[in-house]
Amino acid sequence: MAEDYILELQGITKVFPGVKALDNVHFQLKKGEIHALMGENGAGKSTFIKVITGVHEPEEGEIFLNGKKVVFKEPKDAQKQSIAAIYQHGTTYHHLSVTENIFIGHEKLSKYGMINWTQMNKDAKELLEKLGCNINPRSIMGNLTIAEQQIIEIAKAISTEAKIIIMDEPTAALSKRECEELYRITEQLRDEGCSIIFISHRFEDMYRLASRITVFRDSQYIGTWGINDISNEVLISKMVGREISQIYPKQEVKFGEEILKVEGLSKTGYYKDVTFSVRKGEILAMTGLVGAGRTEVFHGIFGIEKIDNGQIYLDGKEVKINSTLDAMNAGIGYLPEDRHKQGLILDWGIGDNITLATLEKFTKYSIIDRKAERQRAKELAEKVKTKALSVFDKASSLSGGNQQKIIVAKVLNSDLKVIILDEPTKGVDVGAKAQIYEIMSELASKGYGVIMISSEMPEVLGMADTILVMKEGRVSKIFEDAKNVTQEQILEAAMNM
Amino acid sequence: MNNSTLKKFFSDNVREISLILVIIVISIFVQLRSGGNFFTPENIADLFTETAILAILAVGMMMVIITAGIDLSIGAIMALAGMIGTTILKGNQEINPVLIILISIVIGTLCGMINGALVSKLRILPIIATLGMMNVFRGLTYLVSKGSWVLQNDMSRAFLNVATGKVFGINNLVVMALVVYVIGYIFLNFIRTGRKIYAVGNSEESAQVSGIKTERILWLVYTIMGAIAGFAGILYVCKFGAAQGETAVGYEMNVIAASVLGGVSIAGGTGRVQGVLLGALLLGLLNNAMPLINISAFWQEAIRGLIILLSVMSNSLIQRNVEMKALRRRNI
């Protein structure tokens, strides 16, 4: 065990029901370095962090601090060893003050065991001044910008006198100027002797800050390099370089006329000036980092959330969409990302789920014609090749892939022109993925306009005719000819290297 | 105080200031309409005495709601604790009233612990868990009383004096409410455990990651609520001079209303002792004032409901405004 590593993890394996989130992972952190940890979504970075901070206890593997073996059973154990983390989805208390957010869990007490607010406010002010920012410690956390909240989280880490600070995608939601501020603070911390693990998708963060890089992919450790020992291309290939083993049954389709067009779609704080169009038979993939505003745009188009500005045209005619019913009547179908919350009623039968959105078609004088409804449900279920015994089976009895197919069937049931699939293959196994791609391909060949929101590069490249990349709420780039696009180009557009 | 700190003071205390304004406006209106019958020493003393028990309960309910929970069983706990306390008193007239009160608090605490265990350990939704226990506690009250009442002449003079007696000219109940508020204020603002309640209510996940034992906090708030309900229950039967199966039926709704009026968000995370006190006062004021100006009893309920709705609406409008400001600053 080399003594110059302040933190070392060996052979860490963490299993969640059904998934191996970390598989025999290694990591070494030197004293006083900024170490970048990189990898795609789902590579296991966030779980890894939670192992270091004692939130998760690994099934296998050992953690060493300054060469000594330690075991973290709960967050308090790691805190006692001066480890602090700034989580990706902030762990802030929105309704509480800045001071309280900084000191929660280790409040300063007066002689009588009472919380000493005067002292804490003073200390918070000093701490923030030391970090070079002028935030009133009495402000309410929720009223600050995301960048300011990040700084508060850093202040919180410092206030615990942390020696090891982990930052999980701190720049994901920051503007360029805000990033500079964060870089400055991070470097200041390093110069004061902290060791920092910096997780980011942005290459500029890493080049600017880190001295070494470790890459995870598919829950596994890929390697560690000095910042100057690895080229950009090699690094990207290490990050994404899985073989495209799945088959993408993409059919050649001749595009028809433009079917959906949106112009200048905006919603304050979420997206701005989004303009694009889809033709009949075209598959448009929309990609970008998490939080770039992709899903929000389609919530706007589908009438789930109100848009502030912009026009939506279907078949060349402008349509006003104020509700999901408007959208469905106009011929837009949407398959939500979160199947359980938004897509299916799990306790209902398959048939009832399929026909739910179009019950009025089987309804005469307010009475549902159950026979016609069931017949139609059966046809559609067969069309999407669901492996279910009957339309009476509960939706909850199906696998993830088959549930997704039911949602497709549900959308097919209405008079559809455009179908939007939000992360259609998230959490389904490879076999079901291939079937979903097949359905997508078939939909396109039948003349529907297909839009797929996806973070998975292989499926974006494998299925799309046109690729739209979003970044920070805006359209970063549209690749008209998806065949000649590389992953690197897409990553570049998503992150603006 | 310069201009900007004054502005900050107003924006920090919007809720309390607007409640005080509403209370003042209604008071003046009632004073004029009732021909000066409102601002009399007797009526004001009456108003505070009538509000005291409601106000005491609202502190406990606030803590529960801060954790994004709710407790529907408190009316039943009040009845059970009051019934057991006075039943013991009935058989032993010479017992010290303080002991009776303590017994009732212990009974309330036990009830609260059951609620807390259901919510924190078994992870039953608070509304369901406390709805179920509400019926259980109410049923127990009938079992204990065997369907009969404990009446005023079954209670000792010393016990009845608890509700009518005075300290320095102030009614005992009002004094007790003030003590509860001072303790509540200190607990929630200056004691670590109290602040943890807010942390859990803001984000249970964050609290867990920060090393706070969230289950324990959840259990604690329901237990405190139970203890307070037991305390309020015995005061309630003492004040009305009767304990029965139907004691305080539906009273939990008044308490929830007072908390919400006082700015406690049902979504959890926010709420202040000062606000809740004003919320309880406003509710008490409405109850006191409407008969004074001859508003028909039929209208009183509806008007009260309307005022609660208006206040919650204004609250969510303020909240939305704040969120919009934050979104604009993202500059997207």
Image: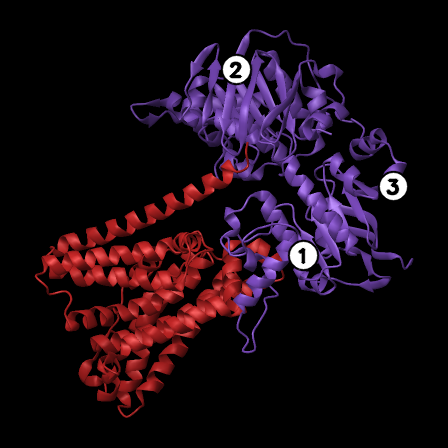
The one nearer the camera, A303 or A306, is: A306
Where is B234 relative to B263, above or below?
A: below
- Rendered residue at 66%/25% (across/down): A435
Q: Chain of mark 3?
A: A
Identify the mark nearer the N-term, 3 or 1: 1
x and y percentages locating residue A457 in the rendered image: 72, 27
- Name which quarter of the figure residue B137 lies in: bottom left
Disc 2 to disc 3, C-alpha distance: 46 Å
Name the residue at 42% across, 42% down.
Answer: B320
Q: Is label 1 in a helix, a strand or a loop?
A: helix
- Label ID, residue A178: none
Asked if residue A48 can be seen in this view, the reply is no
Provide the letter of the chain coloured red: B
Q: Amino acid at mark 1?
A: Ala
Q: Are marks 2 and 1 on the same chain?
A: yes
First in sequence, mark 2 or 3: give its number: 3
- Mark 3 element type: strand
As drawn, B267 above or below B272: above
At horizontal 21% and vertical 75% (from top left) the residue drawn is: B240
